[in-house]
Amino acid sequence: MKKNILIIITLLSFLCSQSMYLGNSKKNAYAVLSLYSEGENKSFIGSVEQNSYHEYGIGFTSVINGNHELSFLSRKNNIDNRTWEGFSGIYNFYLKPKSPVKYFFGTAFSRIENENDNVDEYELKFGLYGDVKGAKSTGVSYYPFFQIGMQREITNLENVDDATNFYTTASAGISFMFQDSKTTGIGIEPSYTKIMFDKGDKDCSNIDCDYYYIGLKIYLWEYGSFRK
């Protein structure tokens, strides 16, 4: 299999920021989520093997009791003149101490496939974020974040020639939340991610094994929707 391709199309560095927007509230909320991302392996720029891609998707995310966040996303992308489709399921738990820095950790599973191949991926991640309140007149809050993840990728699980790869991701970005009422708002989240391939899975002596991509997510959310 073309590991250069598979490492890019199976990204799971979705933060799903809605729990951050709730602060220390223990109420529930939900949102419709859309995303777009694009990236490339810099080592292939200017050659016939240049590896770039774009991906888009839509999904649903819900926060339970202020700290538990569950998300499901449908995804589609085009790479190497092939169309891949699939889904991601994500769970994050948020810790919100009375300090400038908050914490979250989570797990995720993804499957993406085309007419010939499929890829399953598992992820564990940990991150930090801040909560900066803007002026009340603007209704905007800012949430800078950083997260790292460990991921396992399995190609064509049903076949005897299964290929398994491991890699690490690091993401940084900032989430903007525009609250237009006491219970509704819009979240916009640009981010930058670097993917570091396990050097044991591939010959990295002559090429850069790392990949890079930028992403944008938009949330249309409602806060405390299940209140009595």
Image (cartoon, grey):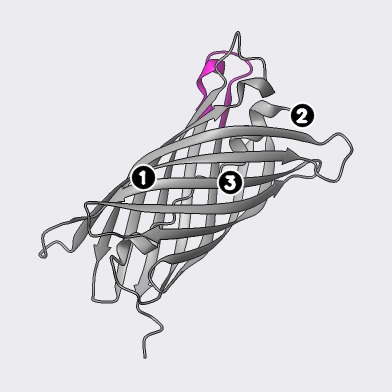
Callout 2, which amino acid? Met
In depth, the one of 206 and 148 nearer the eye is 148
Magenta residues, start to end = 40-52
Q: Position of residue 26 (x, y in %)?
A: 34, 75
Q: Residue lying furthest bottom in this view?
A: 228
Q: Which residue in the protein does label 2 denote?
A: 1
Q: Earlier in the sequence, mark 1 or mark 2?
A: 2
The residue depicted at 38 percent of the width and 62 percent of the height is 18
Q: Is residue 224 left or right of residue 134?
A: right
> In this orientation, does residue 80 appear?
no
In depth, the one of 102 and 181 nearer the eye is 102
Residue 123's disc is 3
Residue 190's disc is 1
Contact (Cβ within 8 Å) of mark 2 with mark 3 = no
In depth, the one of 69 and 97 nearer the eye is 97
Q: Position of residue 113 (x, y in %)?
A: 73, 46
Q: Is residue 35 magenta?
A: no
Callout 1, which amino acid? Pro
Image: 130 above or below 211 = below
Point out the frontmost of discs 3 and 1. 3
Would you identify the image quadrant in which residue 63 lies? bottom left
Q: Earlier in the sequence, mark 2 or mark 3?
A: 2
Q: Is residue 218 left or right of residue 87?
A: left
For label 2, the SS is loop
The residue depicted at 11 percent of the width and 59 percent of the height is 135
In depth, the one of 156 and 129 nearer the eye is 129
> In this orientation, does residue 173 appear?
yes
